[in-house]
Image (cartoon, rainbow, N blue to C red):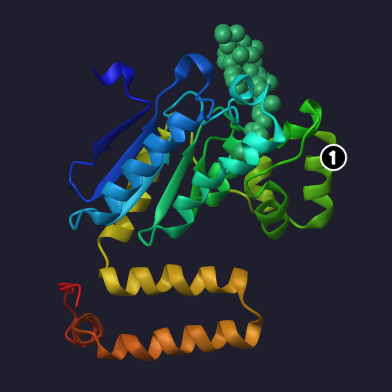
Amino acid sequence: TSGEQLVVPTRSSSNKVSILTLNRPKALNALSTPLFQALNAELEKAEADDEVRAIVITGGEKNFAAGADIKEMKDKEFAEAYTTNFLGSWSKIASIRKPIIGAVAGYALGGGCELAMMCDILVATPKATFGQPEITLGIIPGMGGSQRLTTLIGKVKAMDMVLTGRKIDGVTAEKWGLVSRLTGEGESVVEEAVKVAETIAGFGKVAVQAGKEAVNGSLDLPLEQGLRLERRLFQQLFATQDQKEGMAAFAEKRKPTWSDK
Ligand code: HXC
């Protein structure tokens, strides 16, 4: 039954947005290995489905995820963690080419905060709680917390969060650059994230993918190479029908019809 599914996939009414809801509410969506495997399987399905143009990852309106599953981790030994590549499955999400919008309410702690930061765009409620409390457990972030957080909010704030376990609310997270949009009074974080996803879903697929690739390039590449990647992608878009259509539609004062070619 759907009550036992660790990740529940649904579709927006347009059918263009795959909404993946983490579903371990009693454990505040603690990210166990089976939950992550289920998430990866759903991400692969969404990536392969031609109708899906954007993906929303959420824990629903209550909690995003209170971290990796501490009960699963607590008796782990090095040899097992190393040989089974513990946490290795978390890198799948970075290989998805479709845009991923995170919708965060409640707790996004530890691995939950790291999962949120793996999304391309993040919508949160003002009262959401972000933090990397690993230090309180005798460990440090293991899925990008020390790296992505530093890129997003800068060294001293990342140090503050990682070394003291300081938690911040959604308002602060938005101010610091961890979150791109906050929900207003009475708004659903999932609905707001779906709206962002639908906006993206309304544009041509090729340009959307190129935009994501170009922005991500800035995280990996030195400026000169990043600019070269951007320029090549930009130039290549002049080989698409969508570029001709988009610019013709502007000149003719009409709405473009994208062909994804
Ligand atoms: C396993 C968890 C959990 C977690 C909560 N639960 N977080 N189980 N792993 N990360 C379980 C609790 O054990 C409890 O189960 C139930 O969810 C409800 O939680 P409570 O603690 O009773 O709720 P509350 O008092 O409201 O406190 C909420 C909370 C607290 C402040 C979020 O649960 C908390 O501090 N959780 C741990 C947060 C954390 O340290 N996260 C980082 C994990 S390390 P029972 O069965 O008792 O009802 C990490 C490492 C990442 O993520 C490294 C790479 C991935």
178 relative to 242 in the view: left or right: right
- Quadrant of ligand 1: it is top right
Circle 1: element type: helix
240 relative to 197 in the view: left or right: left
Q: Quadrant of the C terminus?
A: bottom left
Task: Answer few, some or many: residues within 10 Å of disc 1's Cα (few below 14, many 20 plus, some between 14 and 19).
Answer: some
**Residue at 30%, 17% in the rendered image:** 3
Residue furthest out toward the top: 26
Judge by depth and name the residue closer to the eye, 205 or 180.
205
132 relative to 55 in the view: left or right: right
Residue 142 to residue 133: above or below:
below
**Residue at 16%, 77% in the rendered image:** 254
- Where's residue 168, x and y in %? 71, 36
Report which quarter residue 201 is drawn in: bottom left
Disc 1 C-beta below 8 A from ligand 1: no
Q: Which residue is mark 1?
A: 163
**Residue at 81%, 30% in the rendered image:** 138
Residue 192 to residue 196: above or below:
above
Residue 41 to residue 95: above or below:
above
**Residue at 84%, 40% in the rendered image:** 163
